[in-house]
Amino acid sequence: MSYTNLKLFALSSNQELAAKVADKIGIELGRSSVREFSDGEIQVNIEESIRGHHVFILQSTSSPVNDNLMEILIMVDALKRASAETINVVMPYYGYARQDRKARSREPITSKLVANMLEVAGVDRLLTVDLHAPQIQGFFDIPVDHLMGAPLIADYFDRAGLTGNDVVVVSPDHGGVTRARKLAQCLKTPIAIIDKRRSVDKMNTSEVMNIIGNVEGKTCILIDDAGTICHAADALAEAGATNVFASCTHPVLSGPALDNIQKSAIEKLVVLDTIYLPEERLIDKIEQISIADLISEAIIRSHEKRPLSPLFEMGHK
């Protein structure tokens, strides 16, 4: 099918995924350029007419998060001034999502601030994948399509034969129980939960306290949204798990994450390509699955004004 009034543009963060999505839809990526001046300012140029077109911008706000966010805001402003019919942001990874509430006095809710910035800039619709907390959709007064990566991850483990009662899906904390339960439903496995207490003094650190559920003699599959799960994997191995696999939608892999994964009990970490990983970061333990099919189908359905609800179902792959 020809989509003459649909344009897809890629900014800097994940051009490889954007190219795959454009190929799945059957269109060419829109022509644009991003440059950075010596003082750090960003300039975006749209190099073709988009008047009256429905425009989709694909950009994850992964590291460098502030540059990637500014690219979106500047691009949206340019599209508005060039008379785009609608402006749709496809943000596979929504940065600042973990700052979604006031955990302590005088803290900002930066996730809400980002939502405000996108709306004020002129975004008509947001399409994203596996928000840190689904409630973030409520920060927006525009439509938000919240896709799920779990069916793709479930399909990988299903094809690997990791299903049934000999396998346990494990949530590395209480906050991820819903995500773990959905994966367990797909794979027809029981679940377990790691009860851990985070350090008050250090960010991105936690102490494993207890494992709720039976993992001894089982193959375990950890599922997390983006955080480090190496300590959880080691705790499962110490508790008698025979094999430990891990999965997450967004391969943030910040700091010493790659080294920690390499040294951990994790046999394979399954991730999606919501965040671009260069070849040197794709170590042997990491298996990356493309989300291009899901995103391209969501863009087509949105453009054709068809419901996206079938894409939210756990049976969709």
Image (tube, rainbow, N blue to C red):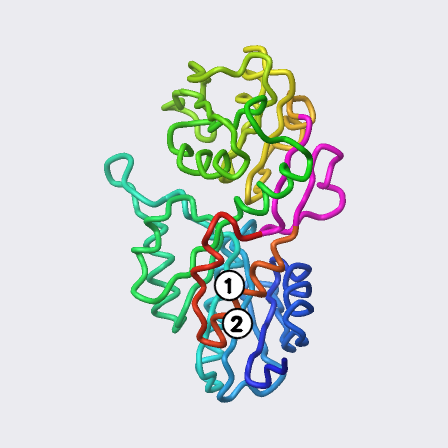
In depth, the one of 111 and 136 nearer the eye is 136
Q: Earlier in the sequence, mark 1 or mark 2?
A: 2
> Which x, y percent locates residue 30?
63, 77
Which residues are drawn in magenta? 267-289
Report the residue marked by disc 1: 90
Q: Quadrant of the N terminus?
A: bottom right
The quarter holding residue 59 reads: bottom right
Find out whether the residues at labels 1 and 2 contact each other: C-beta distance under 8 Å: yes
As drawn, 276 above or below 70: above
As drawn, 183 above or below 303: above
> Which x, y percent locates residue 119?
35, 67
The quarter holding residue 167 reads: top right
User: Looking at the image, which residue is at 37% across and 63% down?
Assistant: 117
> Which x, y percent locates residue 316?
53, 53
Secondary structure beneath label 2: strand
In depth, the one of 62 and 88 nearer the eye is 88
Crowd rating for badge 2 (residues with CA inside 10 Å; few <14, some 14–19, many 20+)? many
User: Looking at the image, which residue is at 67% across and 39% down?
Assistant: 159
Q: Which mark is residue 56?
A: 2
In depth, the one of 180 and 31 nearer the eye is 180
